Image (tube, rainbow, N blue to C red):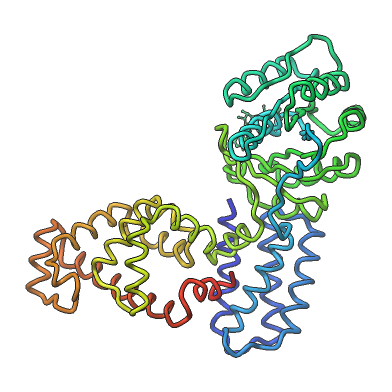
Amino acid sequence: MFDNLTDRLGGVFDKLRGRGALKEEDVRSAMREVRIALLEADVALPVVRDFINSVTEKAVGQSVLKSVAPGQQVVKIVNDALTEMLGSEASDLDLAVAPPAVIMMVGLQGSGKTTSTAKIAKLLKEKHGKKVMMASLDVQRPAAQEQLKVLGEQVNVATLPIVAGQMPVDIARRALQSAKLQSFDVVMLDTAGRLHVDQQLMDEMKAVANEATPKEILLVVDSLTGQDAVNVAQNFSEQVPLTGVVLTRMDGDARGGAALSMRAVTGRPIKFVGMGEKMDAIEPFHPGRVAGRILGMGDVVSLVEKAAATVEREDADKLAAKMSKGQFDMNDLRTQLRQMTKMGGLGALAGMMPGMKKAKAAMSASGVDDKVLVHMDAIIGSMTPKEREKPALLNAKRKIRIAKGSGTTVQDVNRVLKMHQEMEGAMKKIRKMGGLKGLAAMFGG
Ligand code: GDP
């Protein structure tokens, strides 16, 4: 999604990284490049301008901290500004009213409105235990109401029975009455779209909003439409009191500008992103994490969360105990490799771990892939328990034996040894910095 932008920004920061002290001119020329990178990613011009001004002001005025490299300091400032641009905090749906809480979905035809309605209904039902009803107010597009009914059956969420010929405001009224009678917690109104923003559409939205007094009005926009998405969002936000945005097709190869401009243009947070056609392909939007990913600094938060969910308690405890003593042997490396495999292999880790993106690119360029994890495991498996505890024992003869035993080469064995050394070094560093908290601090988390 943000790959190009990430690469461009990475290049800018690489240049800064080598500097001992940052001069104003360094910052200004870096910001010129950041500006171009953002514009190329399709971020709206006024948004880029504000962003660059705010970052330059902070970066130039900043006294250089002794403990971090100046380039790193700029990365942190850009990271904070990006997070702010994306909306600072993850914002949940506000459903705290006497039930039923009404969520109104608005947007152009084909933006993914009906799909997102069903996805969110499923989420509210399964993750939040809400009793949800959906109703389609789309009398424009033939079969729109039928489509929602089919999706409702698919995700096991009730839909308001279709009454032919009824108008949107009347359907909304009927949905509310019916939801009250059957004590539903949430009513989702899927409104009609149009091909373009027009006054008739806006009037209809306003009339429905008046009737249903929704707690949330979510605008659904297609991220693939770039600048157009931003214009549509601006139009809607001027006429309908939006509470948030759902950005669909973030699984596609849009340049990301729509996501970055949305908050500034609508003044409303992105609440969800659509990541595919399947009914569970929707995610709450976390500005801080997305900013981290854009900068390629790694999403330490989700890495740790993911690790915590997959890592077996016992292994983790053992490793932690050893690490606290500064020990890290081949057995530990093996545990780590197995966890990497469980967490989805190198591909899943790339983009989450600092530096992994580049490492992954370098590895796939030289033909290394997830099979490597399996080979490494086999190599460690061919070591004796003593060798595993004390890798220093591995002389040339032993290496040849291990290579034979695992069906690999001595070079492969050396690679495992090198990886072990590097990880041992990293573990020691992390320990010195005060464990994972230190690790997070290192990446500005
Ligand atoms: P509506 O006219 O706004 O109600 O749009 P629909 O909900 O009917 O969606 C139009 C098409 O976009 C459908 O084929 C959906 O499966 C697809 N779609 C919706 N959201 C996403 C998404 O996040 N990713 C992808 N790849 N497709 C999506």
Q: Position of residue 211 (x, y in %)?
A: 90, 28
Q: Is residue 107 visible?
A: no
- Quarter-of-image position of residue 204: top right
Q: Nearer the viewer, residue 113 or 180?
A: 180
Q: Is residue 161 above or below residue 287?
A: above
Residue at horizontal 74%, vertical 60%?
85
Q: Quadrant of the C terminus?
A: bottom right
Looking at the rendering, the quadrant in which ligand 1 lies is: top right
Q: Is residue 145 left or right of residue 365?
A: right
Residue at horizontal 73%, vertical 63%?
84
Q: Is residue 375 left or right of residue 60?
A: left
Q: Is residue 37 visible?
A: yes
Q: Position of residue 250 (x, y in %)?
A: 61, 44
State the count of labels. Answer: 0
Residue at horizontal 75%, vertical 69%?
52
- Quarter-of-image position of residue 29: bottom right
Q: Is residue 399 left or right of residue 165?
A: left
Q: Nearer the viewer, residue 138 or 120?
A: 120
- Quarter-of-image position of residue 173: top right
Q: Position of residue 364 (x, y in %)?
A: 37, 56
Q: Is residue 328 above or below residue 344?
A: below
